[in-house]
Amino acid sequence: MSGSQRPTAAISHVFRGTFIHSTQETAVQILEDALLGVDTGGKIAFIGKAQTLDKLSRTFGFSPSQVTQLKQHEFLMPGMVDTHIHASQYSFAGTALDMPLLQWLNTYTFPVESRFKDLEFANRVYTEIVKRTLRNGTTTACYFATIHTDASLLLAQITNDFGQRALVGKVCMDRNNAVEDYKENLQESQEETCRFIAELLNKKYPLVKPVVTPRFALSCSGAMLGQLGALAKNNRLHIQSHISENEEEVKLVKELFPESESYTDVYHKYNLLTDKTVMAHGCHLSDKELDLFRETGASLSHCPNSNISLCSGMLNVRNVLKHKVKLGLGTDVAGGYSASMLDAVRRALDTSKVLTIQDPDYDTLTFEEVFRLATLGGSQALSLDEKTGNFEVGKDFDALRVNVAAPGAPIDLIENEAPKILLEKFLNLGDDRNIVEVFVAGKKVVPFTGPAE
Ligand code: GUN
Ligand code: FE
């Protein structure tokens, strides 16, 4: 419970019940019969014990009748953060999982991404993925779009309209692509990326920001990587890409960039490793490369469904955490077949258990640790932890109202269970039917309302 709680703005709503979140010190902190107040700016104004209701209502000027009481099997948890998802690949999610990465890109992915020059197609796909992820509890998403500027701006507009917090990247790529009409050249890419960033910033969406997005080292010339590194540095922008996902890719990067010591060094050389960088996968990074991640403040996105589905590798999360590299979870749709962060949680636990099967000394991740990766860890990986990730006073109220016993949902509670068991059951067995409300920056965004429905 936070000590200094002074009112800054009027209170818009107050919840009473069980709140579950992570802190730096504690993977799962449970606050029972607690009160959480949200101000009209969407920020968490106070968290306190229910016994202090009278005092809090006087201090913050709300009426006890304004309080929403959570039901017995309900709790509030922070919204989940998907640190890596290709919105443009959603149409083929659940299919095309029979090839390794580089063949998969040329056979399935690039032909589909090339269709996003058609804004009508883009609108259909992007609307569905934003709705699907929000409904499944993703309050913050870090999206890859395609090379098309207008469709990428449309994705940003759709996330804004539905009220999801997002980083949106127009993809940049100028080489090694077998699909003829899905290419850009260096100059065109620079102009379009600048236009994308300028137009998106100009919209002044409160929760949606651009992210500089070189696809990965194999798709980008050194000149393009340098150009994007400079752009990000000069404008203090977020950066996202892929790294060390599959062994064939790592070998080819070494051949293409013989002057670099490692894959990580390629990005470092072009100023693409900063404290606002998130790199997906990293399954095959050396300890020395992880050190470079820590030194630069760059983070990793663990995408376990994709890593298994494309037979790419298994990230040793314990080793990443030992190196104190910031880490979140990603769905990596459509290399990962599920858009739900609950699936990412389960696949992260499965991968960790496979590593333990292979080496019984491997320290298996706990569900508590993976819960933290899906929430606070993700916000840190995206350098958005001043705004979101847990229930700290002053952060935006990004939250899920979970009912573990929701009618029609997949969990049968035989007896009353303690909150930690409710969390564990939700993470392992729950789905969107258990997520009865979703809030982003204090605004209820699920159930959908109005014309967006
Ligand atoms: N590496 C480069 N592009 C991609 C992509 O679209 N998906 C995945 N999983 N890896 C990539
Ligand atoms: Fe990816």
Image (cartoon, rainbow, N blue to C red):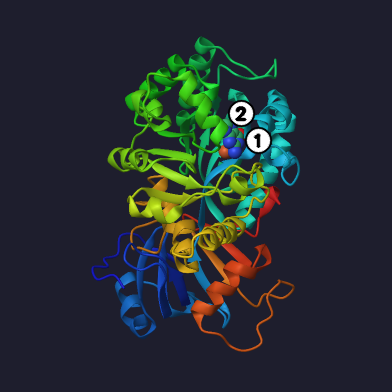
Residue in the foreground of this view, choosing between 99 and 23? 99
Quadrant hosting residue 137 = bottom right
Q: Return the residue at label 1.
A: 88
Q: Residue at x 37, y 57 (%)?
A: 395
Q: Residue furthest bottom?
A: 415
Rendering coords of residue 407 (x, y %): 72, 76
Above or below, 263 against 76 in this view is above
Q: Residue furthest left?
A: 4
Query: What is the crowding at mark 2: few (fewer than 14 residues within 10 Å), some, or many (at least 20)?
Result: many
Amino acid type shown at disc 1: Ser
Residue beneath the point at 47% across and 41% down: 282
Q: Secondary structure at mark 2?
A: loop
Q: Nearer the viewer, residue 62 or 257?
A: 257
Percent from the top left, x then y, of residue 219? Answer: 55, 23
Q: Is residue 79 visible?
A: yes
The three-letter code of the residue at mark 2 reads: Thr
Q: Residue 36 bears which disc, if any?
A: none
Look at the image and tell me whether residue 155 can be seen. Answer: no
Residue at which label 2 appears:
146
Q: Is residue 382 left or right of residue 1?
A: right
Q: Residue 208's spot in the image, x, y percent?
A: 49, 40
Q: Compared to 237, does 367 lie above or below?
A: below
For the residues bearing labels 2 and 1, Cβ distance under 8 angstroms:
yes
Along the line of sight, the residue nearer the viewer: 355 or 143 = 355
Q: Earlier in the sequence, mark 2 or mark 1?
A: 1
* Residue 52 image-quadrant placement: bottom left
Q: Is residue 9 above or below residue 337?
A: below
